Amino acid sequence: MKTFQIEIEAYALQDYFKPIRKKTDIWKIILNLIKLIPYNYKQSIHDPKGKITIYVSKISRVIFETEQNLFSLYFPFTVIDKEDSLIFLSKSGIEISSSLSSQMLSIIDEINENDLISFQDLNLIPENFEYENENALFILNELLLQEDGYLRFDHDIENADGNLHPEKHIDIFFQNASKVKLGLNNTLDHSQFLDILNTETDCWYLK
């Protein structure tokens, strides 16, 4: 399994470890990661507060980790390891550069701020918002058709409420109306969490 890992400092946690309420929140996490990697890949961080690991084999996953929790998303891009940097390609083979990521993030912000239903509605924004690269919309449309693969482990002492909200639990799906919560007796570490996600290892069972 190919593994690509970066460490993150305290200031960057807010881009990744915040509540996910809708699909565009997930896109922003992935695209902010694309922008971060050129500066952090194979760099030693003095005081890391978390780490992000991309795994590629039969699965394509990214795991975000702090001392308090772990969560994973489907990683929607092909990863090419080129010496001291990583190159990311969309499903259709378009390279996802930092600048293209920034344009996609701008589109997402416009959609969220103007309560737009579709990308086509960008033309209705009074400020005549413009995007430079047509690939930005094309890739966002690709992401729209792909699964998110959201899975989260929380060790949530502050909000624990008996069996209603166990201190240790797994959340499947991110929207409250569709969320599945599974209580755990023990904490999951990174390797156990990855083992649950890895289709090439033996399955875990609910007991």
Image: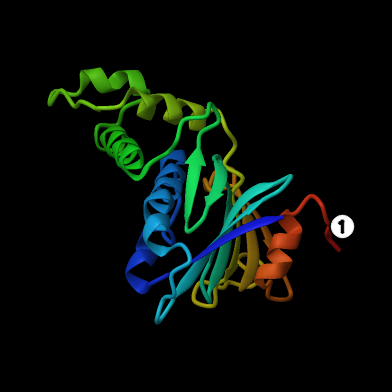
User: Which scheme is used to colour this image of the protein?
Assistant: rainbow
> What residue is shown at x 73% (from left), y 68% (from top)?
192
The residue pinned by badge 1 equals: 202
**Residue at image point 61% right, 45% down:** 149
Q: Quadrant of residue 188?
A: bottom right
Q: Secondary structure at mark 1?
A: loop
Query: Could one spot residue 183 in this view of the protein?
Result: no
Front residue (pair 92, 76):
92
Q: Residue at coordinates 49% horizontally, 42% vertically from top-left? A: 88
Q: Give percent across and percent down for residue 5.
A: 54, 63
* Residue 140 picture location, percent across and down: 43, 30
Q: In the image, is 198 to the left or to the right of 94?
A: right
Residue 39 placement, left or right of 144: left
Q: Residue at x 30, y 20 (%)?
A: 121
Task: Tell whether 33 sits left or right of 92.
Answer: left
Q: Quadrant of residue 107?
A: top left
Quarter holding the N terminus is bottom right
| In front of the other: 68 or 76 | 76
